[in-house]
Amino acid sequence: MTRPRKSFRGGLAQFDAVIAATGSAGAWEEMPAGYWRFRRADGAILNWWPSTGTFNFQGQPAAAKAFERELVEVVDGLRIKPPALTSSGEG
C-alpha cells in the first residue's frame, strides 16, 4: 500500500475549501516563516507551506491524528481523476 503524500498545490482559498470538506472549522494564521497555520477548536493544528505544498500536523495528539486522516483522505480523493470521456465520432 502506498503512503499518502501530504501535500496540496493550490491557493489558500482552495485549501480552505478542501479543509471545509472534512467538516473542520477553525482559523488560519499567516506565520512569519512563510507558512500558514490552521487551528481547529479541538486542538489540532495544520501547518502548510504554499511554496512546496507540504503540510503537517501537530497539537493535541488524538485530534491531530483524526484531522490528518480526514484531510489526507480528501486530498488523495482530489488526485483521483475519472477517465476522460472521448467521442469516437460514431453516431
Image: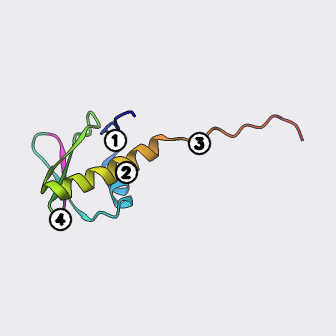
Question: Label 2 amino acid?
Answer: Gln
Q: Return the x and y of residue 80 as percentages of the image width and height.
A: 50, 41
The crowd level at tag 1 (other Cα within 10 Å; few <14, some 14-19, many 20+) is many
Nearest the camera: 25 or 80?
A: 80
In the displayed structure image, the side of residue 86 where residue 77 appears, left or right:
left
The crowd level at tag 3 (other Cα within 10 Å; few <14, some 14-19, many 20+) is few
Disc nearer the start of the sequence (2/4): 2
Residue at position x 26%, y 40% in the image: 50
Residue placed under numbered mark 2 in the picture: 14
Q: Which residues are magenta?
A: 34-41
Disc nearer the start of the sequence (1/4): 1
Question: Label 3 amino acid?
Answer: Pro
Residue placed under numbered mark 1 in the picture: 8
- Figure quadrant of the N terminus: top left
Disc nearer the start of the sequence (1/3): 1
Q: Secondary structure at mark 3?
A: loop
Which of label 1 and label 3 is nearer to you? 3
Q: Return the x and y of residue 41 as percentages of the image width and height.
A: 18, 66
Instruction: Please give the label number shown on residue 82.
Output: 3
Disc nearer the start of the sequence (3/2): 2
Q: Return the x and y of residue 79 as percentages of the image width and height.
A: 46, 40
